[in-house]
Image (cartoon, rainbow, N blue to C red):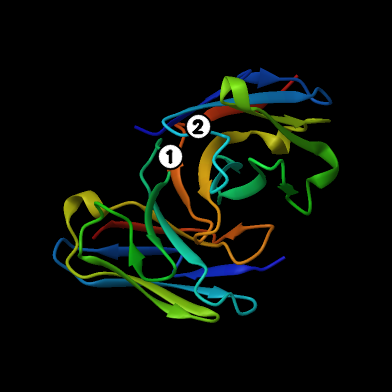
């Protein structure tokens, strides 16, 4: 059974750095055909892809947020970590991690439940 | 970045209706188009990949079509559990991008 679960702070202050962790089970981050993406959704707005990482450590980032994002993984712990620097109230959103099937159609076939992060002083 | 435009943004329909949602890409994405269903307060659920292939377990009343820049999602006979927001997403190239979503509600 594939599951993903996001964890991290529910409230951050403007200018702070956000660190989110995605813990996966039911598949391995060693699997060359799978990776993990982070996606966010501001309240009432569209989904926005942020970043992904694969077993070979290949990474890709959102064009507009690239300078603020870092994605990494700890394969032994089955965890993927996303950091976003210089948080602003416009970054208030539900943050999801999702499994991505590489060498397939790059679809997000399993999603975590999401974690709502509010940016406020 | 590839822009994805869905239409309509919202749609009202009745149980049993046939509905179609369209999604247009700003450049050709071959068939790298996926659809997701999202209910309030929940994570998106994966429905369709490669424009027209149903994910395992998705009811056959859902279908997808298209290639290049124009795509559609059709629900042949709406059921009460289908009222939700639908998102298209291109997976042709990074940064992957989503449409703005289509909210389907009960008339």
Q: Residue at x 64, y 78 (%)?
A: B27
Name the side, left or right, on which B58 lies relative to A74.
left
Image position of A30 with respect to A64: above or below: above
Please provide percent x and percent y for residue A113.
Answer: 44, 31
Left or right placement of residue A43 versus residue A9 in this view = left
Residue B12 versus residue A57 in the image, above or below: below
Residue furthest left in the image: B16
Disc 2 target residue: A114
In which quadrant is the N terminus of chain A drawn? top left
- Residue A19 coordinates in the image, percent (x, y): 71, 23
* Circles 2 and 1 on the same subunit: no
Looking at the rendered structure, the secondary structure element under dot 2 is loop
Label 1: few (<14), some (14–19) or many (≥20) C-alpha neighbours in 10 Å: many
Q: CA distance from mark 2 to mark 1?
A: 7 Å
Q: Position of residue A95 (x, y in %)?
A: 58, 34
In the rendered view, would you say A65 is above or below A81? below
Name the quarter where the C terminus of chain A is drawn: top right
Which of the two residues, B104 or B107, is positioned nearer the viewer here? B104
Name the residue: 64% across, 68% down: B3
Confirm whether residue A41 shows in the render.
no
Residue identified by numbered label 1: B43
CB under 8 Å between discs 2 and 1:
yes
């Amino acid at each position: 059974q594939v599951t993903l679960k996001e964890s991290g702070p529910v409230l951050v202050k403007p200018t702070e750095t956000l660190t989110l962790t995605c813990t996966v089970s039911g598949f391995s981050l060693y699997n060359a055909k799978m990776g993990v993406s982070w996606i966010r959704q501001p309240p009432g707005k569209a989904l926005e892809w942020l970043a992904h990482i694969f077993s070979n450590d290949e990474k890709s980032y959102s064009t507009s947020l690239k300078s603020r994002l870092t994605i990494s993984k700890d394969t032994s712990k089955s965890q993927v970590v996303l950091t976003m620097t210089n948080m602003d109230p416009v970054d208030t959103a539900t943050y999801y991690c999702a499994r991505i099937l590489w060498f397939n159609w790059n679809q997000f076939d399993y999603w975590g439940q999401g974690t709502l992060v509010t940016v406020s002083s | 970045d590839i822009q994805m435009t869905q239409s309509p943004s919202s749609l009202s329909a009745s149980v049993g209706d046939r509905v179609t949602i369209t999604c247009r890409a700003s450049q050709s994405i071959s068939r790298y188009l996926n659809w997701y269903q999202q209910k309030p307060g929940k994570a998106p659920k994966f429905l369709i990949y490669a424009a027209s292939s149903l994910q395992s377990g998705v009811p056959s009343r859902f279908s997808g079509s298209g290639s290049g820049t124009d795509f559609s999602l059709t629900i042949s006979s709406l059921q009460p559990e289908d009222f939700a927001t639908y998102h298209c997403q291109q997976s042709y190239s990074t940064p992957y991008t989503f449409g703005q979503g289509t909210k389907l509600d009960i008339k």
